C-alpha cells in the first residue's frame, strides 16, 4: 500500500514536470484589492475640518484571491514604508496610530505572495475629438488635454465603432488646431468623426491614500508689553517695527540718519524684549 502511494506521488511529480495541464500550477496575476481606510475619531476634533487636535487611529484592509502577505503605509509620499502587523490570508486588517503634525497624505498598499501590488483606480474624464481621426493615424486632436498624460487609456466612440488606444505623449506646447495634440502608442483601426466621445482613463495608482491633519500646537499668545518695546525703538530711531508672525521683529529703514552701531544695538535689545513674553509657534 505504501509502495503504491509512493509510486502515485512520483507519477504526479513527473507528470507536472512534463507539463501536464491537469497538475501544472497557474501563475497568480491578480492583485490584492484595498479597502477604504477609515479614521478614528471619525470626525475632526479641531475647530474646523479636517483638523484633529491629537493622534488619529487609521484602519487599513485588503483582500486577495489567494492571500495578502504584506500591508504597509507611508507618511513621506512613498520614500519609506512601514509594515503593519497582519496574519496573511484572503482578507486582512490592521491599524496604525498617526501622530505626525500637519496635513499628511498617508499612502497604503498591499502585496500577495506572487508580488502583485494593489491598484487603486483613478477617476475617468470625458472629452471629445476636436478633429476627425482616420484609421492608421498615430496622433489625434482632443478637445482638451487638461490632466492628460502618457499612459492614459482613451476609449473612443461607442458600440461597434469603439476602440481603445493609449497616449504615448501629450504634445507641448499645445499646437494650434487642427494639428494633433496627442501621440498614440498604436495606430487607430477605425475612422472617427469630429465630436466623437472620448473617455480618458489614467492608469491606476499602486497605492491608496487617506488624509490625516493633526495640529496639537496652541496659538501664539503675545503680551502687550512686547508692543511697548516696539514703541520704544520706534521713538529712538524714527521708524516702524515690522514683526513677522513666526519670526523675530525687524526694523524698517529709519526716517532719519542713525549711527549703524546704535541701530544694531537697539535692534538686538528690541529682539530680546519680547522673547520672554511669546512662544515661537505658528497659528493655525
Image: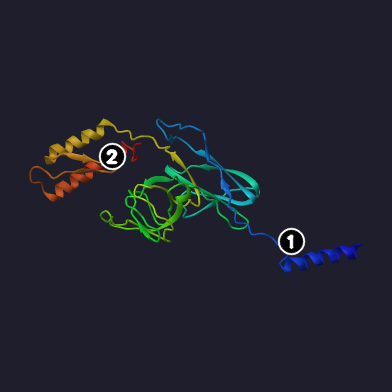
Quadrant assignment for the N terminus: bottom right
Which residue is at the front of the view, 172 or 70?
172
Quadrant assignment for the C terminus: top left
Which residue is at the front of the view, 101 or 235?
101
First along the sequence among labels 1 and 2: 1
What scheme was used to colour the molecule?
A: rainbow
Location of mark 1 (residue): 23
Which residue is at the front of the view, 49 or 269?
49
Q: Mark 2 and mark 1 in contact (Cβ < 8 Å)?
A: no
Q: Residues within 10 Å of mark 2 (few under 14, many from 20)?
A: few
Q: Residue at x 32, y 50 (%)?
A: 130
Q: Residue 188: percent from the left, percent from the top?
A: 42, 58
Local secondary structure at mark 1: loop
Tell which tag, 1 or 2, sits nearer the viewer: 1
Q: Residue 52: percent from the left, percent from the top?
A: 45, 35
Q: Residue at x 34, y 49 (%)?
A: 194
Q: Residue at x 60, y 56 (%)?
A: 29
Cα separation between marks 1 and 2: 72 Å
Q: Is residue 221 left or right of residue 40?
A: left
Q: Residue at x 14, y 47 (%)?
A: 262
Residue 196, can we see it? yes
Q: Which residue is the extreme one toward the left?
A: 256
Location of mark 2 (residue): 245
Residue 76, can we see it? no
Say the numbered circle drawn on residue 187. none
The image quadrant that residue 137 belongs to is: bottom left
Q: Is residue 240 left or right of residue 185?
A: left
Q: Name above or below for residue 214 compared with residue 90.
A: above
Local secondary structure at mark 2: loop
Q: Is residue 259 left or right of residue 84?
A: left
Amino acid at each position: 500500500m505504501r509502495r503504491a502511494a509512493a509510486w502515485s506521488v512520483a507519477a504526479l511529480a513527473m507528470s507536472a514536470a512534463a507539463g501536464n495541464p491537469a497538475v501544472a500550477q497557474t501563475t497568480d496575476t491578480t492583485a490584492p484589492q484595498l479597502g477604504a481606510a477609515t479614521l478614528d475619531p471619525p470626525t475632526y476634533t479641531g475647530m474646523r475640518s479636517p483638523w484633529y487636535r491629537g493622534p488619529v487611529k487609521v484602519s487599513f484592509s485588503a483582500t486577495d484571491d489567494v492571500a495578502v502577505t504584506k500591508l504597509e503605509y507611508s507618511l513621506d509620499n512613498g520614500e519609506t514604508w512601514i509594515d503593519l502587523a497582519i496574519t496573511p490570508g484572503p482578507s486582512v486588517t490592521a491599524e496604525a496610530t498617526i501622530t505626525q503634525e500637519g496635513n499628511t497624505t498617508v499612502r497604503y498598499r498591499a502585496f500577495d505572495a506572487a508580488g502583485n501590488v494593489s491598484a487603486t483606480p483613478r477617476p475617468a474624464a470625458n472629452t471629445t475629438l476636436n478633429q476627425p481621426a482616420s484609421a492608421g493615424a498615430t496622433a489625434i486632436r482632443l478637445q482638451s488635454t487638461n490632466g492628460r498624460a502618457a499612459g492614459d487609456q482613451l476609449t473612443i466612440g461607442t458600440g461597434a465603432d469603439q476602440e481603445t488606444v493609449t497616449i504615448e505623449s501629450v504634445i507641448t506646447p499645445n499646437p494650434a488646431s487642427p494639428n494633433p495634440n496627442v501621440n498614440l502608442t498604436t495606430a487607430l483601426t477605425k475612422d472617427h468623426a469630429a465630436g466623437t466621445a472620448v473617455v480618458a482613463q489614467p492608469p491606476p495608482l499602486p497605492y491608496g491614500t487617506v488624509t490625516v491633519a493633526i495640529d496639537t500646537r496652541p496659538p501664539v499668545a503675545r503680551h502687550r508689553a512686547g508692543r511697548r518695546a516696539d514703541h520704544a525703538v520706534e521713538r529712538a530711531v524714527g521708524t516702524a517695527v515690522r514683526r513677522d508672525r513666526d519670526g523675530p521683529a525687524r526694523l524698517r529703514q529709519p526716517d532719519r540718519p542713525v549711527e549703524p552701531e546704535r541701530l544694531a544695538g537697539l535692534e538686538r535689545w528690541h529682539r530680546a524684549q519680547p522673547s520672554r513674553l511669546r512662544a515661537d509657534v505658528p497659528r493655525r
